Image (cartoon, rainbow, N blue to C red):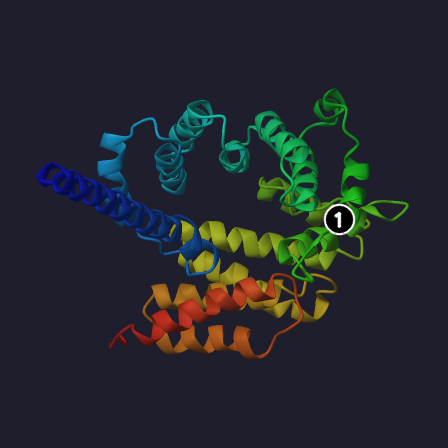
């Protein structure tokens, strides 16, 4: 009887440890997901990477080849700008297991972006193509992204892939899907952008161009600008503003964002550019300690604009930014 009681106690204790471990694992993954994805996509981009690394460190020691651990290690490296290290960890994650293919698809997506940031277009294309072939999450986004990457390659390089760039963009709209009866915002964005290729004379997108200075020069020197010309110029200004902001060149960033605002009446299609620029200006002023001005610009983006691409995503960010501003002390001269 004593042995039976001991066995029962041991069994119960083992279950408690297992249950506690599962709960701890869920909490860990939730926090890691928040710091490395949610805070960036739906917040103000202020995820705590130091906290994420501290959470991950003991598990790196215990499970150095665990696919989830390798994935988040890679994600943190990418967010720190160490794309070479991130690529290496993502590749280790791919090699770690073959049972859970969804993790492979997540790695393909991240590797596609890492190679894009390094302007390694052929490698980025390879992973975009794998997503098109293997993942069913959003064919519209994957085809659009593959076409965008091909747009960065030379005509000869595109020819070697066997792809038809214009036909890829034209396929995007037919691949849209609905979740719970609603369209996916990122798919709607991709579809609107891809429609420029439906015309008999397609108008090339500027969005895929990461080399903004040559693209900007092309727009300025184009002798016969298309109807999309004002939108494209504003898009480049907003992208330049974001880059300059992260380089710490705040005055130049401010000039880029305000140029978008001053061109508002000229924008014909990409109405999202103005509220997004207002939001970024608000964050810029917050960074400089001007809380009143920051709040004013972000409230403007919230209250005075609607029915534009990625509206729901921006509203999540606006909500996070306003909550952050309410807790920020006002600086005095």
- The residue under the point 42% across, 33% down is 83
Left or right placement of residue 301 versus residue 71 in this view: right
**Vertically, is 131 above or below 226?**
above
Q: Which residue is drawn at 81% across and 44% down?
A: 170
Q: Few, some or many C-alpha atoms within 10 Å of disc 1 (few <14, some 14-19, many ≥20)? A: many
Q: Under tag 1, what secondary structure? A: helix
In the depicted structure, whether residue 182 falls above or below residue 126: below
Pick the front one: 98 or 249: 98
Q: Which residue is drawn at 55% across and 79% down?
A: 303
**Residue projecting furthest to the left:** 2
Residue 29 shows in this picture: yes
Q: Identify the residue at the far right of this view.
A: 200
Work out whether 90 lies above or below 285.
above
Q: How many marks?
A: 1
**Percent of width and height locating residue 274:** 60, 67
Q: Where is residue 226 in the image (x, y as percent from the top left)?
A: 80, 53
Task: Please indicate whether residue 96 sits to the left or right of residue 60 in the image.
Answer: right
Choose between 2 and 154: the one closer to the eye. 2
In-image side of 126 versus 161 (left or right): left
Q: In which quarter of the image is the C terminus?
A: bottom left
Q: Which residue is drawn at 21% across and 45% down?
A: 12
């Amino acid at each position: 009887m004593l042995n039976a009681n001991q066995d029962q106690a041991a069994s119960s204790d083992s279950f408690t440890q297992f249950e506690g471990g599962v709960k701890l694992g869920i909490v860990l993954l939730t926090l890691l997901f928040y710091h490395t994805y949610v805070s960036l996509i739906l917040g103000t981009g202020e995820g705590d990477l130091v906290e994420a690394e501290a959470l991950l460190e003991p598990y790196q020691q215990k499970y150095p080849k665990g696919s989830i651990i390798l994935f988040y290690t890679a994600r943190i490296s990418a967010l720190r700008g160490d794309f070479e290290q991130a690529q290496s960890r993502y590749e280790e994650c791919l090699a770690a297991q073959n049972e859970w293919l969804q993790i492979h698809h997540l790695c393909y997506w991240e590797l596609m972006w890492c190679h894009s940031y390094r302007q390694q277009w052929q490698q980025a294309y390879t992973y975009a193509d794998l997503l098109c072939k293997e993942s069913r999450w959003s064919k519209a986004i994957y085809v659009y992204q593959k076409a965008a990457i091909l747009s960065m390659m030379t005509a000869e390089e595109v020819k070697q892939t066997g792809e038809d760039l214009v036909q890829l963009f034209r396929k995007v709209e037919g691949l849209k899907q609905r979740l719970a009866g609603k369209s996916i915002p990122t798919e709607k964005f991709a579809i609107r952008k891809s429609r420029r290729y439906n015309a008999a004379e397609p108008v090339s997108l500027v969005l895929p161009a990461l080399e903004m200075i040559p693209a900007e020069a092309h727009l300025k020197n184009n002798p016969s600008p298309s109807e999309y010309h004002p939108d494209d110029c504003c898009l480049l200004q907003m992208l330049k503003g974001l880059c300059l902001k992260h380089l710490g060149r705040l005055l130049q960033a401010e000039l880029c964002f305000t140029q978008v605002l001053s061109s508002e009446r000229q924008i014909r299609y990409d109405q999202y550019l103005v509220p997004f620029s207002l939001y970024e200006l608000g964050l810029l002023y917050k960074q400089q300690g001007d809380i009143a001005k920051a709040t004013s610009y972000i409230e403007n983006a919230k209250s005075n604009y609607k029915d534009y691409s990625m509206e729901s995503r921006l509203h999540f960010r606006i909500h996070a930014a306003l909550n952050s501003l309410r807790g920020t002390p006002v600086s005095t001269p």
